[in-house]
Amino acid sequence: MTRPYNFSPGPAALPEPVLRRAAEEMLDWHGSGVSVMEMSHRGKEFMSIYAATLASLRALLAVPDNYKIVFLQGGAIGENAIVPMNLLRGRTRADYVNTGDWSRRSIAEAARYCTVNVAASAEANGFTAIPPQREWQLDASAAYVHICSNETIIGLEYHWTPDTGDVPLVADMSSDILSRPLDVSRYGLIYAGAQKNIGPAGLTIVIVRDDLLGGALPTTPTAFDYTVQAANDSMINTPPTYAIYVAGLVFDWIAAQGGLAAMAERNRAKAELLYGCLDASGFYRTRVVAADRSLMNVCFHLPDPALDADFLAGAREAGLLALKGHRIVGGMRASIYNAMPVEGVRALAAYLRDFETRRS
Ligand SMILES: *Cc1c(COP(=O)(O)O)cnc(C)c1O
């Protein structure tokens, strides 16, 4: 069976070898006689899966010893509230940088817990460029500075790490975590929903520096208290066991590909291929400035939205799925996370050229 290329923004494609392995192990995990879905989260089988998954993630990202990794639920949208609950630590203000719809949603949620200072906004440039740090109006009394490292909807990505001095930097990395090597020590906290570049929906990963723990608001739900979860192997409630297992298979797959440096090289090559094709055309249009283009979500428009339906139908026929852009921005979006092979991007580039020739 050959599968189509799936450009879904999320939940997104998983590496085919991972799906095959999960299928092979579905009914009987390693001779246990049961599926991972049917095991006690506290039994020795699942505990071994959990420990291996955590260790693989720690190794891939070279997470320093003074950081905890917790596996939660609630997604990045949950974290929009859980982060201020845990990180305000008696302060009343937090800095947020607004680079698009996901940061806007983080800001709206945080404003329920603290005074939000929008330190910089890309609104003035129509969300086509990341505001350079020299323009940021940071507040020295802020509990933290929050960014969204990749705006999944518009395809706007940081290719540099902000320097926020002693104020902890917090990043929503839902759509670009594990796409490249990362210096975790530059951040106070990193969070990501799993369903873009890690595994199935339902798992949320939080990486947090030790000194930021211990100060959660007293009203923080226990299941969302990083300190409590970190001290209990993220098992104060039943964790999303199957999602953790599949994430572990993905981490092993990434390591087998050569780790994050190899991923970064592949992702750069894929994005260059696609943007190169779009730039060479007089037909398709992109909006984001070249320096801040996302390597994960390649957004573009056809010259007339009336062509969109034909474009998408033809793409589907060519085995290229889920290219419709987010309803907020329209147009097209090709999400090319780690699991998208370069062959899929080549097939899309060929389709782009073909459609342009036929319709321009
Ligand atoms: C998908 C996405 C979200 C939303 O995540 P949920 O899992 O639905 O809560 C938030 N932020 C970014 C950057 C995303 O890509």
Image: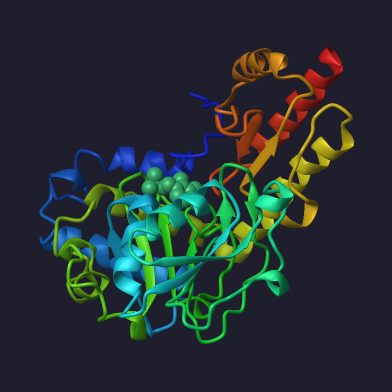
Residue 293 shows in the view: no
Say which quarter of the image contains residue 274.
top right
Does residue 49 appear to the left or right of 168 in the view shown?
Answer: left
168 lies above or below 196? below
283 or 106, which is in the foreground?
Answer: 106
Left or right of 234, for residue 4: right
Residue 219 at x, y percent in the picture? 18, 66
Q: Residue at x 67, y 69 (%)?
A: 160
Tell me the colour scheme of the image: rainbow
Q: Is residue 221 above or below residue 33?
A: below
Outermost residue toward the front in this view: 115
Q: Residue 261 versus residue 203: which sits nearer the camera? A: 203
Q: Tag count in the figure?
A: 0
Residue 27 appears in which quarter of the rendering? top left
Residue 346 or residue 222, whichever sits in front: 222
Query: Residue 100: image x %, image y %?
Result: 58, 49
User: Residue placed at 29% from the left, 67% from the top?
Assistant: 85
> Percent x, y for residue 121?
63, 58
Which image quadrant is residue 347 in? top right
Location of the C terminus by quadrant is top right
Left or right: 42 as drawn, with respect to 150: left
Q: Is residue 166 visible?
A: yes
Residue in the image at 39% along x and 59% along y: 111
Q: Residue at x 39, y 40 (%)?
A: 19
Drawn side of residue 98 relative to residue 84, left or right:
right
Q: Position of residue 298 (x, y in %)?
A: 67, 41
